Amino acid sequence: MRRVVLMTLSGLMVLVGLLWTLQGLGYVQGSFMSGVRLWSLIGPVVAGFGVALGLVALRGPRQ
C-alpha cells in the first residue's frame, strides 16, 4: 500500500513539475505563472524530487 501511495505521489510531482516548467517557458497559457521564468526553474526541481521519490518507492525498504 505504501509503495502505491508513493508512486502515485511521485507521478503527480513529475506531471506538476512538467506543467510548471512549460508554463514558465510560456508554452502553456492561461495562468498567472505563464511566462514567469521562476516557474521554469521550480518545475524541474519538483519533477526531479518526484523521480527521486519514485526510485525510493521502487527500491523498497532496506534489508
Image: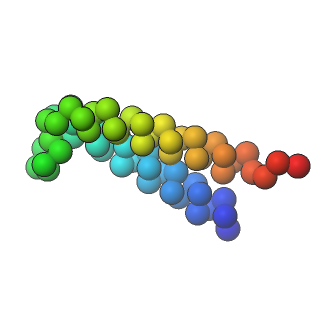
27 sits left or right of 14 in the view: left
State the residue at coordinates (58%, 54%). 7
Q: How many numbered markers are drawn?
A: 0
State the residue at coordinates (52%, 51%). 10
Q: Residue furthest right?
A: 63
The image position of residue 14, as x and y in percent, is 44, 45
Q: Quadrant of residue 35?
A: top left
Q: Nearer the viewer, residue 36 or 5?
A: 36
Res. 10 visible in picture? yes
The image position of residue 53, as x and y in percent, is 58, 47
The image position of residue 5, as x and y in percent, is 58, 63
52 sits left or right of 16 in the view: right
Q: What's the coloring here? A: rainbow
Q: Is residue 3 positioned above or below 1 on the image?
A: above
Q: Quadrant of residue 42?
A: top left
33 sits left or right of 21 in the view: left
The image position of residue 51, as x and y in percent, is 54, 41
Quadrant where the N terminus sits is bottom right
Q: Is residue 58 positioned above or below 22 on the image?
A: below
